[in-house]
Amino acid sequence: MRQELMSLPKGLAEDVASNLVMVARLIDEDPEQAYAYSRIALRLASRVAAVREAAGFAAYATQKYSEALAEFRAARRMTGTVELWPVMADCERGLGRPERALAMAGEPEVQKLDKAGQVEMRLVAAGARRDMGQLDAAIVTLQSPELASNSVQPWTARLRYAYADALLAATREDEAREWFAKALEADKDGSTDASDRLAELDGVDFVDAMVEDDEDGDLDAPRAEVEPDFDDEGEEEDDFEGDDTDVVRAAEIVDAGLVEPAPGEAGSAPVTQSVASTESAAVDESAPTGEGEKNA
């Protein structure tokens, strides 16, 4: 990415880089805001492949699949790489076209992907099968050497989770529980909710501690009333001392031209997984990639 930005004038390159950094920082916590930053970067440097890719992931994170697909295609034309092939196929699923996603899973481009990309493609294909109501086919699609391997790779937890979720959808609960447990064992960074799914299967109910405290206490007990303070003229005083920090910060951002409202919205608007680098082509499991983990 740095090499691509170096082709731009220094000042412009710095502006584009700043917006791309914000996209990466906000994509998980506030995808709409990240999307807004991506649109600024796109307006400044639409001929930079990294910008088109970031814009694609930002649109993908906000479920703007048609827009995301167009940006991914543009980035692929510029770079000639196939890294974005799985997420492009997942966009087809998001657009309600699982048949196209399956067709892409059988294209020669898949053989050019690295191992991580091939696993992502398998997850997308299985999700497409489930979209079409083909549960047994989805289960078979996920059965692979990567699933059977005991070694833990970055994709292991999600692959096992998707397999467990497919088994559960096929009412094979005992097998599903086994694979949710295996997914949890491999999920070191909490990328799945395998622990919650296991708890559901085991019939474990979680109780909010705050609610429990309220139930133990007397909710009907009278509360002490606070007498309002009045100033010298008899007017009720406001005890709140405002903090203008957020207002000032917002004004500084607007004045700096870093944020613009998203089209049709008063607020602002955003890359799948943590796109700290727009060079990643991994499919965000929070997007349309299957049920449960979305890649199931």
Image (cartoon, helix red, strand yellow):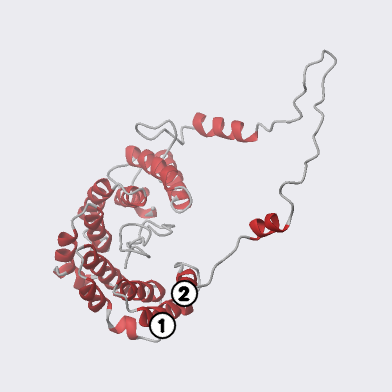
The relative height of residue 199 versus residue 244 in the rendered view (above or below) is below
Q: Are marks 1 and 2 in contact (CB under 8 Å)?
A: no
Is residue 13 at least partly visible in the picture?
no
The percent coordinates of residue 16 (x first, y second) are 40, 43
Q: Amino acid at mark 2?
A: Leu
Cα distance in 3D space between marks 1 and 2: 9 Å
The percent coordinates of residue 19 (x first, y second) are 43, 44
**Mark 1 residue crowding within 10 angstroms, few (<14) / some (14–19) / many (20+):** few
Foreground: 266 or 206?
Answer: 206
The relative height of residue 207 versus residue 45 in the rendered view (above or below) is below
Foreground: 20 or 169?
Answer: 169
Could you tell which of marks 1 and 2 lies nearer the N-terminus?
Answer: 1
Q: Amino acid at mark 1?
A: Glu
The relative height of residue 255 versus residue 79 in the rendered view (above or below) is above
The relative height of residue 294 versus residue 269 in the rendered view (above or below) is below
Foreground: 9 or 63?
Answer: 63
Tell me: 268 left or right of 241: left
Where is the C terminus found, in terms of image quarters?
bottom left
Is residue 98 at least partly visible in the picture?
yes
Q: Residue at x 44, y 57 (%)?
A: 276
Q: Which residue is mark 1?
A: 178
The numbered mark at residue 198 is 2
